[in-house]
Image: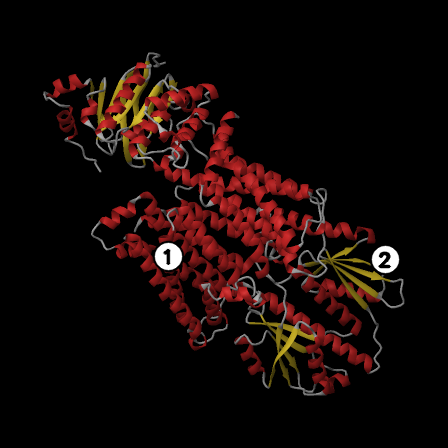
Amino acid sequence: MDRNDRLAISVKGLTKRFGAFTAVDHITFDVAGGEIFGFLGANGAGKTTAMRMLCGLSFPTEGKGWVAGFDIMKQSEQIKKHIGYMSQRFSLYDDLTVVENMRLFAGIYGMKTSDAKLRIDELLSQLHFGQERHAIVGSLPLGWKQKLSFSVATIHRPEILFLDEPTGGVDPITRRQFWELIYSSVNEGMTVFVTTHYMDEAEYCNRLSVMVDGQIKALNTPKELKLQYGVDTMDEVFRRIARGATRSE
Amino acid sequence: MKTLLVLLRKEFIQFRRNKFMPKLVVMFPMMAMLVIPLVTTMDVKNVNVAVVDADKSEISRRIVSDMQASPYLRLSLYAETYHEALDAVEKGAADVILLLPTDYEKKLVSGHAPSISVHANGVNATKGQLGAQYLSQAVTQTLIKLKRERGIVLPRENIYVQNRYNPTLDYRIYMIPALMVILVIMICGFLPALNLVGEKESGTIEQINVSPVSRVTFTLSKLIPYWIIGLMVLTFAMTIAWLAYGLVPTGSLLTIYAATLLFSFVMSGFGVAVANCSSTMQQSMYVMFFFIVIFQLMSGLMTPIDSMPQWAQYITYLVPPRYFIEIMRAVYLKGSAMQDLWPEFVVLAVIAAVMSLIAMLTYKKQS
Amino acid sequence: MLHILRDSRTMVIVLLIPVILMFLFGFAISTEVNNVNVVAVAPVQNDYIRGVLSRISENQYMTFKGCIAPKDIDATLRQSRADAVMVFNHDRPVPKIELIMDASNTTVAQSAAACLRGIIASEGGGMTEFVTMRMLYNPQMKSSYNFVPGIMGMLFILICAMMTSVSIVREKETGTMEVLLVSPVRPMHVIITKLVPYFVLSCVVLAAILLIAYGLLGLPLSATVLNVVWVSLLYILLSLALGILISTMTERQVTALLVSAMLFMLPVIMLSGMLFPIENMPEVLQWVSYLVPARWYIDTMRKLMIEQLPVSGVWENIMVMGGMTLLIVIIAIRKFNDQLE
């Protein structure tokens, strides 16, 4: 067994093909427990597809992978109990209120009613939800929706949190708040796997991988990456790596 | 189990909060039950007859005047030529042509009478066929009367027709149970499909798929609301049938509800399965429409199954509403009991189980 | 604009619907009454009764299912094993025949009773046949002809009005409509490009229907086909205009779907005279039916295709349809422009 209990995520040669198109091409990496692992790449590089395979939303064509100690090929339903997922596109119920959405997912993850109540109150105050808690979600501005998505993803205190571009389309102040939330989740013991294309955010990660055309072209700490390419910012690192990209939207 | 309750609560909140759905579930049955029975009269009245009288004898005139006494037949044209009568049929002025051949009276006296011809407009088969039958019946009666008057002894028979279960031959009474079936087909079929594809289009299903919810639980949370709605719609429709048409089921309510419940399993399972296999609302609606048309046409809802050719009759065994319609008509009008209808119940139960299973199996959390 | 062609599954189904419908209506379904199952209660049989029964067996509309005991009458009817029970009573000097019809199906009961009376009368009259019947236009009594216009009326509403409105509203829902509308393309052009694929699709469906009707169902081919085609194109335009109108009035796909289903599909099926004769409807509904575009189209098609009338025979209908098209287009454009402001 290649399985390593200390690793939150372990992936070997993971591949996804859609017909003739290879979206994710033999990627291999490990994520340690308690880490913030950044997943960088241009649009269409294959980040979301890779993440969807890890979350059990999509079957890998090839390769092996373990998430929270479970095999992604065979035990995807087990994995789902231990992860939280925030999708790139807002995917909560527009016609329910903030609290109703949270209660729904607390129930789905099998939380006891009393525990759920405490957890929901905690999250609401952490996210500074005031009057909005009883507002219909569809009427909230995007920043609030994103915060709600985040809180729903963490409602059951998952071991591993998958965030797919959590700060897309969000103002700088809310982005800042988001990263505070991510750090506090890590302090609670979660592992965070986050995709982004904001290079300043990349600096907040413990380790980074850069995907180009479905392959991982670089994987290291932000500091090491900058040293390796002899540049001062992650922005430039990314530009150097992505120069050879053939796919982009 | 607790997860199912949580999901069901969500479905009901969403349903209640929707501006359109609750109105639809109330208004649609009401409109359908109040308007459609007024429209769907297959009763054939006012059959317009064009007479071509080549005989112009006393007998031929008697036939025509007797014919006019019939409440169904109406003399619309006394044509000189067959061509003229045909023209009237083409213009829609006549439905049936009565052809009285030349020298009919003379030949009748000599005992070598040719047949009188009745030509009916085949465009509207129901009206054509019934109209032609009424006409030939009227003519036959006149001829028999004439024979007797001329001293030809014929056995006198008395025919009494008893129209059991619907003595006044009210077409509405025939249509109302079928209408209830249509309502359950539409509401229990379309709504779950729309609901589930809606979740796919808005992306909310993704958040469910990434959670540990089991396929069975999630599918049930999509089916159960429509079982309840199906029973509600039926109750509503039956109330309207009672208030507006004074029609109450002759058989037991329990049998009707049992059949409706089974059939709403079938339809909601079908709707969910279609939604599972489609990615857009448009696509799912095409598929649903396709099957619902087949369901309505091949189930004996509007046209008798017995009139279909043998191969088509075999196909109808695969059409689930066929069994539901049989049960509904039999229980509603004839007062048939569960033991009279057990084959239908068994088949419906099997289809319900299979359909629910398909609904669960076609739901894929992982692509 | 190409998105509908890419969706091959939808395409297949859209083309399959008319083909299957035509096939079913053409060969499977008929409103005429056939195969009426008759059983008899005849404790004592004589020549007269045997004569009647053999006539029933020979009748093409009847199936004689044998004799039963008087006590089984009720069960036989309730279990739908027979449509009619013929009871011969012998305890009177005059033969009395009682026809017990399962009138839960009124059409069958009516038709079968009339037919049985005829059979009994001709046996009594000792004659071969007083009257012979013949059906005009489709002597085999195939109802297929009758339904072709109805199917056309229904399908074009489905494809043009329903599906077009849903696809436009979908763009509104997903927000792509806004992107298109702020682009330099003129708003009306955006809509027209949305309509073209459905127009093309309708033409393909029209071709398929005509091919089946004239090729397979044997509808007599004549010069009126050209008239059928251009009147159908007019109706397709009318339906497309309806589609735009619905799309301007609704914000969500589900609403567009249900509105077009309830406001257009149902009336088309019920009020257009496709299944149920208009003349039997209450006066008020007859007036309502004048507002249903499909009613005019189906009527026109019936006259052109089945009765083979020249176009001069239907010009009133065509004028009405043309007027409706113009009116709906004007309202739709006005609504659409209101929406932009």
**Mark 2 burial class by Cα count in 10 Å: few <14, some 14-19, many 20+:** few
* Element type at mark 1: helix
Q: Percent x, y for residue C124?
A: 80, 71
Say which residue label 2 marks: C43
Q: Which amino acid does label 1 sit on?
A: Leu
Q: Mark on residue C245?
A: 1
Residue situated furthest front in the rendering: A131
Query: Is B83 situated above or below C319?
Result: below
Position of residue B354 in the picture relative to residue C214 (left or right)? right
Q: Percent x, y for residue B73?
A: 66, 74
Q: Which residue is drawn at 70% across and 65% down?
A: C59
Q: Percent x, y for residue A220?
A: 20, 18
Q: Which amino acid does label 2 sit on?
A: Pro
**In this orientation, which residue lies closer to the viewer: A229 or B313?**
A229
- Dot 2 or dot 1: first in sequence order is 2
* Quadrant where the image shows the N terminus of chain A: top left
**In the rendered structure, the residue with mark 1 lies on which chain?**
C
Position of residue B361 in the picture relative to residue C50 (left or right)? left
